[in-house]
Amino acid sequence: MGIAMTIWDQSRECMSRDQLEQLQLERLQATLNRVYRNVSFYKKTFDRIGFDPEDIDDLGALSVLPFTSRKDLAAAYPYEMFAVPLREVVRIHASSGTLENPSIVGYTANDVRHWQDLVARLLTAVGVTRDDVVQVAFNYGLFTGAFGLHYGIERIGASVVPASVGNTRRQVSILKDYRTTTLVCTPGYALRIAQVLERMGIDPKTLALKRGIFGGEPWDEQMRTAVEQQLYIRVYDNYGLSEVMGPGVAGECLNRQGLHLAEDHFIAEIVDPVTGQILPDGSTGELVLTTITKEAFPVIRFRTGDLTSLDRTACPCGRTLARIAGIAGRCDDIVIVKGVNIHPVEVGPILREVTGTEPAYQLVVDRDDAYQDRLGIRIAVSEALFFDKMEKQRVMVDRLRKKIRDTLGVTPDIYLVEAASIGTDSETAPRVVDKRTRGKPGA
């Protein structure tokens, strides 16, 4: 394929760095003025440090501004971070998996158009065209993944199959009967589909499936290889998060040498997670993003919690946009299981509600031989919590498992352990133990 066939917007994706940085500066100036006028959080923040948006004349000046955190967004629930009146908001999504107020994200009609184009970029970059049939096996709801990808698929003129999640045998039937060419889901679910294909006696080679576009959970090159070998497809990574936009922030091209970041819409920084100091290109640190085209919900220096690095060297595909490495992990205590963001502190109130107390506990995330994520919760046994009779213990564990499933959206394995095996010192006993390999797809 020539460049023109694999690049959706060549004028933006292949512009010179000088042109790009000038465009970023102009859009940043407009965004800073927008949030100063319309978002009280940012007005107070700027006034507190004596920052005047009119004075910014260099991209480096962005570093003087404080970070925006998920706690800031939660405190602004539901609409205090919106920069436009609600009547101009045509779409509302929310982040997943938090007992705090979720981040409510709004989109104007123009925001939605930009979103569609950015998803069209990542689809085109991996060879999707209007001749493809794309099966979206993400949950359709407040989660941004399914709808963001859905409208981007329609934008390029491909056929979209909104299969949503679950009912794997039906997913397999759709793959076979609808002649799906591109599968969009979590990599773990793709392996689940491969298992069901085998049980149903269907040879993956007989499918029309050519590629998979995956996200929503941590994965690595080993998992990529497993999916490719079991489904006989080519697998690509993409990156997005609800608080910034959703899918379309960054994605691999056919070369798979990192994820091209939409720098004409987002300014990226890599910072030391502890000090907040900006790190040089190539260094692994926390990804910080500033939106420069979002109208309804702009965010300034948003701390994503994701660990990655920036690469601004040329890519063989012809794009000049910087690339991020596949996400290597997180620098906070959020853990992503089956596409759901889980804060460890969410478990404590559930324990109190069910048992009347809050013992020491620890989340353990692992991946089984079939590359399926498993969430385990280790709970310290005490006389006040559990009983001598095994039947009463089983009833309590079953209630906990059901309550956690209903609250967090993931069914855990519950383990009753001695308190000493968890520890009570938060500095020495991590609340989360993630045993999954943290490789870097696309690195």
Image: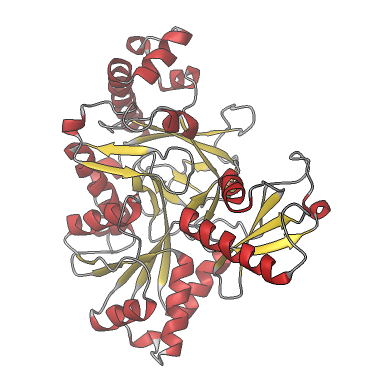
Q: How many marks?
A: 0
Q: Residue 257 at what x, y percent from top left?
A: 47, 55
Is 391 located above or below residue 250 in the figure? below
Where 227 sits versus 11, above or below?
below
Residue furthest bottom as drawn: 201
Q: Residue at x 32, y 16 (%)?
A: 36
Which residue lies at the image location 61% right of the left edge and 71% below the top edge?
Answer: 368
Q: Quadrant of the N terminus?
A: bottom left
Q: Residue 4: horizontal and vertical position, in percent?
A: 23, 55
Quarter of the rendering containing residue 135: bottom left
Q: In which quarter of the view is residue 249 placed?
A: top left
Up the image or down, 17 lies above or below 158; here it is above
Q: Is residue 257 visible?
A: no
Residue 22, x across and y down, in percent: 32, 26
Q: Which residue is at a point 38% across and 57% down the rendered structure image?
A: 253
Please tell me in which quadrant of the rendered image residue 115 appears: top left
Identity of the residue drawn at 18% across and 65% down: 130
Residue 148 vs residue 373: left or right?
left
**How is colour applied across the structure in the image?**
secondary structure
Q: Position of residue 72 (x, y in %)?
A: 46, 28
Q: Nearer the viewer, residue 396 or 18?
A: 396
